[in-house]
Amino acid sequence: MRKIWAILRKDKYDRLAAELQDVLLLGWNQATKDAINEVIRAIKGREKFSREALNRMSRELSIRLGLRFANRIAAPLLEIETATYEVGMKDIIKIKPTFHLVDQRALEMLQRHNIFWVREFFDRQLGEQVEELGRQVIEQGLTREQAGQLYIDAFKGRFQSYSWRYWQGYSNHVVTRSREMGRIEGYVRAGVEFYEVRAVLDYRTTDICREMHGRIIPVKNGVALRDKLIAAESPEEVKEIAPWMKPEQVRGKKSSRLNIGLALPPYHFNCRSRTVIWHPPAEAYRVDELEYGKDLSRNEKKTLAGLTEEEYSNWLATIQGRQKLNFAPESLEAAYERDAAKLKVKSKDEYLQLARRLVKKPKQIFAQIAGGEKQFVFWGEGGYAVVNENAQLIGVHPYSGRVSGMAAKRLWLKRKL
C-alpha cells in the first residue's frame, strides 16, 4: 500500500521518491522486526554479554539487514528506477520513449549501484552504532538479558529513527540520479545542445547547489559523464567519477572548467537539483555585458567571474521571475528598524512593497560578494534592494549617489533594454 501523501504530491518525481520511501520503510520495518525476533530475543541468560556474542550478533544482523533486505526490495527498486528514467526522458522528448541498448545499460548501472548501498547500509553505517552500544554493554559488565533489552529498545527507537532518515534521503538520491540519466538521453534524442542546472533555492539549499544553480552545461558533457558511469565497474569507481565536491572547489570557476562529475546532479546526498533545457534568456532578464568595478578585490572578482552573461541572466530570471519575493526571516526586523526612517516608509508592508518594486523594475542591477556569499543588488528610485542566493530579500537601503558609486565595488550586470 502506498502512502496517501505519496499520491497527493503534485510533482511526479516527488511522488516517485515517496513511493520508494514507502517500499524502503515498510521493508525495513519488517526486516528489523525479523531481526529482533530471530536474533536479539535469542540473547538470553544472566551471564555477561561478551565480545564473542557481540560479533556473532553483528554477523547475523548484517545478513538480515544487508543481503536479505536488499533482495527483498530489489524488484520494486528497479521498477521505480525504470519509471523515473522513463519519465525523465519523456519530459524532454514529449512522447513515451522506447528503450535502446544505452538505456538498458544505464538502468543496469543504476540498479547495480543503488542496490550496493542498500546492502552496505548496515555494515557501513548502522553497524557502527550497534558496535558502539555493544562496547558500552561489555564495559559496564551487563548481562546477556540486559544487552538484549537495550538492543530491542535501540532498534525500536534511535536506530529506527536514524535508518528512516537515511532511507528518505536515499530515495530522493535514487530518483535524482535516475531522472537525470533519463534526461540526458532525452536531450540527445531531442537534439538539445545545452541544458541548465536548477537548484531549489530555500533555507535547505546546500552551498554546492547554489554554486551550480544557473550554470549552462553542454549536453556532450552530460553524455560523457553518463557513459563513464555506465562503464564503472564498482560503486567506488562511481564515487571517483562523480565525487561530491566542496563549494570552494567550484566557486569562481567557469562552467567549461568544472570537473566532468558535476555535469549532472546529484551533487550530494538527498540532492534536489535538476536539469532543464537551456533557452536563451528572455529580454527582460538578459545580461549583455559584465563590467567589473575598479575597487573589487582580486578574490571578489575571481568569485564573480565564475558565471557568464547567460548564467547571470538565469539568476535574474530566477529572482525577478518569482511572483512573490519574500524576506529572509532573520533579516526583516533588523533591516526595517535600521532603514525605514531613511526610506520614508511607515510600515513593514510598505517596506516590503518597496523592496519588491525595486527588484521587479530596477534601473541597474549588480552582483556583489558580502559575508562570503554572492548577492544581487537592484538599484532604482528610492534606494536599492539586496537579494541573497536563496532568492530572498535581505535588505532595502537608501542611496542617492551616482551609479558609478554603486558600480565601483560590484559587478555591473549591464543590460541594453
Image: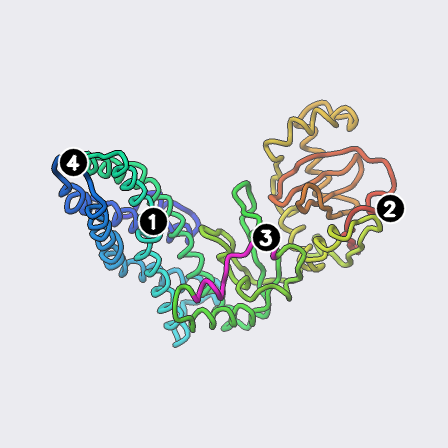
Residue 247's mark?
A: 3
Q: Which residue is mark 4?
A: 145
Going by the picture, which residue comes out furthest to the left? 45
Residue 86 in percent (x, y) is at: 40, 64
Q: Nearer the viewer, mark 4 or mark 2?
A: 4
Amino acid on which disc 3 is placed: Pro
Q: Residues within 10 Å of mark 3 (few under 14, many from 20)?
A: some
Q: Earlier in the sequence, mark 2 or mark 1?
A: 1
The part of the chain drawn in magenta is: 237-249
Amino acid on which disc 4 is placed: Glu
Residue 365 in percent (x, y) is at: 76, 47
Going by the picture, which residue comes out furthest to the bottom? 101
Q: Residues within 10 Å of mark 2 (few under 14, many from 20)?
A: few
Q: Earlier in the sequence, mark 3 or mark 2?
A: 3
- Is 67 on the left or on the right of 388, as rendered? left
Q: Which residue is mark 1?
A: 21
- Is 346 on the left or on the right of 267, as rendered? right
